[in-house]
Image (spheres, coloured by chain):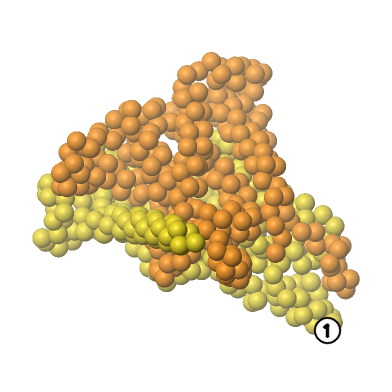
Chain colours: A yellow, B orange
Amino acid sequence: MSTDVHVSSLQRGGRLAGRGIGRLFVWSWVLFSLAMLVWLILAAFKRNNSVFRDLWALPDSNEIQNFRDAWDLLNLARTTLNSVLTVGGGTALTMAVAAPAAYALTRMYFRGASPLISFFALGIGVPVHAIIIPLFVGLSEVNLTNNLWGLTLTYMGVSIPFAVFLMTGFFRSLPSELEEAAVMEGAGPLRVFFVMLPLARPGMVASALIVAVGLWNEFLLALVLTYDVDKRTIGVGLLNTFGAMRYTSNWVGLFASVVIMLTPLIILYTWMSRRIIEGLTVGATK
Amino acid sequence: MGVPSTMDVSPPHLRHDGRRAGAFIAPALAIYLAIIMAPTVATVWISFTEWRGIGDSPEFVGLENYRHLLKSDTFWGSFNRTLAILIAGGLVVFFFSFVFTMLLREMRAKRFIRAVLFFPNIVPPVALAIAWGVLLAPRNGLLNGFLEAIGLESATRTWLAPDLIFRSVIAGLVWIYTGFFITILMAGVDRIPKHFYEAADLEGATPRQKLFRVTLPLTWDVLSVAAVLWVITAIKTFEFIYAFGGSGTDPSISTWTLPVQVYAVALGNRSPIFALGQGSAIAVIMLALVGVLVVLVRRIMRRRGVEF
């Protein structure tokens, strides 16, 4: 009996030690990620000739010049405008068509709704690379390549499957009392939709955020479908800045560019990380 | 994930015929068909032709593009690297995700940790590639610098050399995606009612028993979704590999995966070769790979879960 107790307390000790090592590992991973972010931000304020010589030094001067360089390297005024137009427009238009679709698919109870949801979900599995060739050819046939409208339309197309899929999850979970009351009072389908829409707001905000972040970070479609310098998005601008590094070696300018591109994301994330994270996981668990 | 049939539970006065619903769905469906589905079909067709793009007329060559690929070492290299990400990367990602999820369940700072680990998933892949490049740079990289600083010069490596660079790519992908899958698994674990674990604790269950008797069966649905998502993610991941493998320009062949090769042979590269037929054939193989593996994963993982 006493040996039993002895063994189990030994096991428990081992288990606690294991858990301690595990937690240490988790915290090292967290620290590693944070350290990398902090290093990049600090590096953006360093001088190019010393940034790699003394890796762990704090910036000794406020190198605002780096950010002026980054502004030029990224062609920031133009690329930001292009990104805001295509990402903002693409997100808004995606929501405008995906919300009614998701609503009808979950709350209008018609034959064929469920296979249609699966058909939309199928699009999530189609890699962009599998369609980019005919997409490029097709859009150039109708003069929509090298055109921000063409890019916006494409952004809608690639966002719709996920947005519809995510929002069907949200609409399905809404209570039906309000809907029934509206129908009793003789409201038509469009009126009922607008009665229900505010209830789905958290889901819509989450979906819009996820779509917008994905498009903001995207560069393949922008790279292939636009080619004039004044049509570039910020993602392509950053890629080109990175690619030009082997000629310019202006590393601190590159780091400043990264910081510029990350800033809106960090602000958004500290403010709404729970919404983004929970929105993204709702599709997987509902 | 199964989509529950809405027909049988629908309140009769809310039931509509398809026509009314059609008006709500038509715009989304039209754009979806035009931008995703039509090009998918077109890709299959182009893969049977030889075509240099606009100005050239496609010439039907049957299975020639596929025959060429099956004999090409470059293609098999890309194919095997894609599988390496899928399987080796997948095992590591899921191992870490599982261990972290179990550890985080009992940690107080779990929301903060989850937010930090998830963060790379909202950062532009180019920025991640830049950070990863700075970390692993051979001469003045952070990792080698750190190893030297703590007296482990012998552990420093040329991480970006051809023989190691693809492992560095996989390590980067693991760093990025583990946070995503932790988040998904945690959402599943959080749904398990606490009293299951309390009961297990009262019975004196070991952590391993809790894992296999409580956590795994009760998160099986979520796990199956996560596995499907991993298949899709692993096969289509492109931006990080492209930007990291080429430091912002055309990546070296030793880092090519299927999507990188599609881009390289069809549209990209400093001097594009516009081999649209061949690029499309690779794209079709990618699509087939996604399709087959998704069906396979769903079949393997079906119906082992427990309702609660």
As displayed, is residue A130 above or below residue A235? above
Considering the image in quadrants, where does the C terminus of chain B appear?
A: bottom right
Q: Position of residue A144 (x, y in %)?
A: 55, 45
Q: Which residue is under mark 1? A: A185
Q: Identify residue type, mark 1.
A: Glu
Q: Residue at x 39, y 27 (%)?
A: B253
SS class, disc 1: loop
Report whether B292 appears left or right of A36: right
As displayed, is residue A122 above or below residue B122? above
- Residue B144 visible within the image: yes
Q: Quadrant of residue A36?
A: bottom left
Report whether B286 appears left or right of B255: right
- Residue A215 visible within the image: no
Judging depth in this view, the residue of B95 and A59 nearest the camera is B95
Residue extending farthest right: B12
Q: Position of residue B171 (x, y in %)?
A: 38, 42
Q: Position of residue B262 (x, y in %)?
A: 51, 31
Q: Residue at x 76, y 76 (%)?
A: A176
Q: Chain of mark 1?
A: A
Judging depth in this view, the residue of A279 and A109 nearest the camera is A279
Report whether A245 appears left or right of A88: left
Residue extending farthest front: A1
Q: Residue at x 65, y 30 (%)?
A: B44
Q: Residue at x 36, y 49 (%)?
A: B128
